[in-house]
Image (spheres, rainbow, N blue to C red):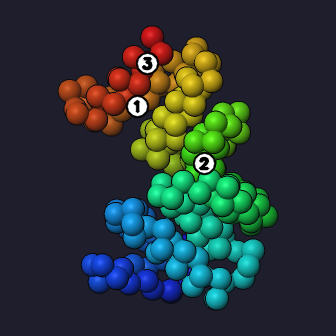
Amino acid sequence: GGGLIPAIIQDRKTSKVLTLEFQNDVLKLDNANMLPLAREALALREKFAPPESPEIAQSLAFVAYALRATSGNLDEAEKLIVRSLAIYEKTEPDGLGMAEAQHIAGQVYGVRGQRDRAIASYRRSVAIKQAKLGEGHPDVILSLQYLAGDLNRSRQFVEAEAIFRRIVAQNEKLHGRQNVNMLRPLIYLCTVL
């Protein structure tokens, strides 16, 4: 994944310095800044990294995420995420970068109404994250949540319910039964009952 290229971006609005190693910090910015910073990060990486490197794949996925989240340009988002996945398939097919790119692909495909592709991407994301992080990790639970949501929208209610129940159980283990973090998983479960 990231961290090999010491490129730095400065958020023009807050003057906060963002390194490419911590691209998730950009996610906390308002949507108006997300896409330009994601594109800038990609441009910097393209100057210094090999074109088929995991660093390029990560930045491509991040731009695809920003496009989906901000501009709605789903054609460009899909092209970028497909390119990212192809690079990860060659370089780190079972790495966490691939898992995140698969999750973003699922989001892009889901918004486009391509449920089968979204579900396949979320399944791959979950499988990799479970192998690397363990079943109860919050990132695994998040991908499971998206998977179950698209299964639900695809009218695959039995599998969606089973996954939502699993999410509720994992959240209860992580946070306890009376925690506010239990609310959303319980609401999602109710959508399939």
The kind of residue on which mark 2 rests is: Val
Q: Give the x, y percent position of residue 31.
A: 39, 62
Counting residues from the start of the chain, the first of labels 3 and 1 encountered is 1
Q: Nearer the viewer, residue 176 or 77?
A: 77
Tell me, for residue 170, which label it has, or none.
1
Give the answer, above or below, for where 26 lies relative to 77.
Answer: below
Q: Nearer the viewer, residue 51 or 154?
A: 154
The kind of residue on which mark 1 rests is: Gln
Q: Residue reaching furthest left?
A: 178
The answer to whether mark 2 and mark 3 are in CB contact below 8 A is no
* Cα gap from disc 3 to disc 1, whole angstroms: 18 Å
Q: Residue at x 51, y 71 (%)?
A: 38
Tell me, for residue 35, which label it has, or none.
none
Count residues near mark 1 (Cα–Cα under 10 Å), then give few for <14, some for 14-19, many for 20+: many
The answer to whether mark 3 and mark 1 are in CB contact below 8 A is no
Q: Residue at x 57, y 85 (%)?
A: 44
* Cα gap from disc 2 to disc 3, whole angstroms: 22 Å
Give the answer, above or below, for where 141 lies relative to 33.
Answer: above
Q: Quick one: quadrant of the C terminus?
A: top left
Counting residues from the start of the chain, the first of labels 2 and 3 encountered is 2
Q: Give the x, y percent position of residue 177.
A: 25, 25
Where residue 125 sits, quadrant-wise, is top right
Judging by the rendered image, the residue that carries numbered circle 3 is 191
Count residues near mark 2 (Cα–Cα under 10 Å), then give few for <14, some for 14-19, many for 20+: many
Per the image, label 2 sits on a secondary structure element best described as helix
Mark 1 or mark 2, whichever is nearer to me: 2
Q: Nearer the viewer, residue 10 or 182?
A: 10
Q: Residue at x 44, y 29 (%)?
A: 167
Counting residues from the start of the chain, the first of labels 1 and 2 encountered is 2
Judging by the rendered image, the residue that carries numbered circle 2 is 108
